[in-house]
Amino acid sequence: MLALVAPGLALAAGGGGGERLDLTTHWVGFASLGIFVLAYALVMAEEFTHLRKSKPVILAAGIIWALVAYVYHTHPELPAGMAESAVRHNLLEYSELMLFLLVAMTYINAMDERNVFETLRSWLVAKGFSFRQLFWITGVLAFFISPVADNLTTALLMCAVVLAVGGDNNKFVLLACINIVVAANAGGAFSPFGDITTLMVWQKGVITPTGMVDFWAFFSLFIPSLVNWLVPASIMVMAVPNVNPTGGGEAISMKRGAKRIIAFFLLTIATAVSFHNFLHMPPVIGMLTGLAYLQFFGFYLKKTAHKDHHGKREDPEAEGQLGEIVAFDVFRKIARAEWDTLLFFYGVVLCVGGLGFIGYLAMTSQMMYTEWGAALGLSAAMNATPANIAVGVLSAIVDNIPVMFAVLTMMPDMSMGQWLLVTLTAGVGGSMLSIGSAAGVALMGQARGRYTFFGHLKWAPVIALGYVASIAVHLMVNGSMF
């Protein structure tokens, strides 16, 4: 009876040597696609509806997996718990991402509370930098910090500076945030630690150059990544107001312990890198270890809070407010994390994971890597080029992590030049839309109402020009790798 009702239902090869249902032509598959598209439409309309972006994707994730679980429940002949195992795998991926981001956001909130960004803002204003100079300064910093601190953390850090310096100049804030997203994603594309997708490619070991450690092979993408950022930045800077920031020029000093928190943040990044590079552990373990540094230092600040009063302890009014005003509590900084962004990532990972389990991602990869190149009559070395370019465009719409995961699962037979190409496109392609990368999504939350989806969309053609230029430069500079 089920076969008559759903003629498109079939068995497909699944992970671990088992079999799973191919639901791509089943009503559950079509319904899941529709639900996902509707949820993303609501995300894109956040600027007008003022509905938090996490709400529709969380609901969509629950419905999609409920539909999948229902279909598998009606097939007792399949191994028990297949859908449960798949969703648990997606939850593990999300938990690593969420905890990593939570630590980064906590450090940023702690530095913000210690006046780090206000001090930097007042210093930049005192130096007399114009908005156009600040546009370039934040872009350069984002490009060169992201290979070490990852693109998301870097974008959050630079956005905090832009919001502090930009004041009420919304045009500058919008353009500077777009520039930061493009620069951070471009900088993260040429380092294994700069983006989750590059980390996935590095861990998979598909880039194995002759006579070169695979870690350093990623730096072959430095020039293409630089071009990807410079092309749109050179055009956007013309629209930046050529004036100086006004107001708030008075000198602001950092609170006690600010420099040590910055040092602990750098030590946390080094710990995460070391855990992965030398101990072969997930980087999130190193980040959580680094959170303990901040927790212990926060305990010290809380116990020595009287040093911040400078003699105000004799004032009865100050005495009553001592704990509230001065005491440093790391858990308050955790509570200030952008939870809408973190929950949005949950919805995205679970939604796309559900669509992948249904079979849509594998079907798309199969079509791209086996049919497109043959249809265009390309040589064997360049056969995967159209597919790898499309991966970047797709990552701007969906998300680069599940798209790259699908490619790595498919494991097409490609040269090192092609693997570097898909690493580049997946890393920088998300810059074309604000929802296409973790950096863009995070900044929409941090600069809510000032950096928006449609504000970014207006500059998408310029960013796409940089995307095309970076691919052309990669084909030229690294042509011997194909």
Image: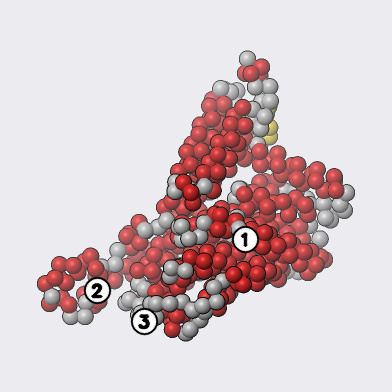
Residue 294 versus residue 134 in the image, above or below: above
Residue 115 image position (x, y, % from top left): 36, 73
Q: Is residue 134 visible?
A: no
Q: Which mark is residue 304?
A: 2
Looking at the rendered structure, the kind of residue marked 2 is Thr
SS at mark 1 in the image: loop
Residue at which label 1 appears? 459
Q: Residue at x 68, y 54 (%)?
A: 392
Residue 25 versus residue 271 in the image, above or below: above
| Horizontal relation, residue 47 to residue 321: left or right | right
**How far is disc 2 from disc 1 in space, using C-alphas?**
49 Å
Looking at the rendered structure, the kind of residue marked 1 is Trp
In terms of sequence position, does the residue under pointer 1 or pointer 3 come before the other? Answer: 3
Q: Residue at x 78, y 57 (%)?
A: 415
> Can you tell which quarter of the image residue 118 is in?
bottom left
Q: Relative to the observer, which residue lies in front, 365 or 448?
A: 448
Classed neighbour count for the residue bearing mark 2: other residues with Cα under 10 Å, few (<14), some (14–19), many (≥20): few
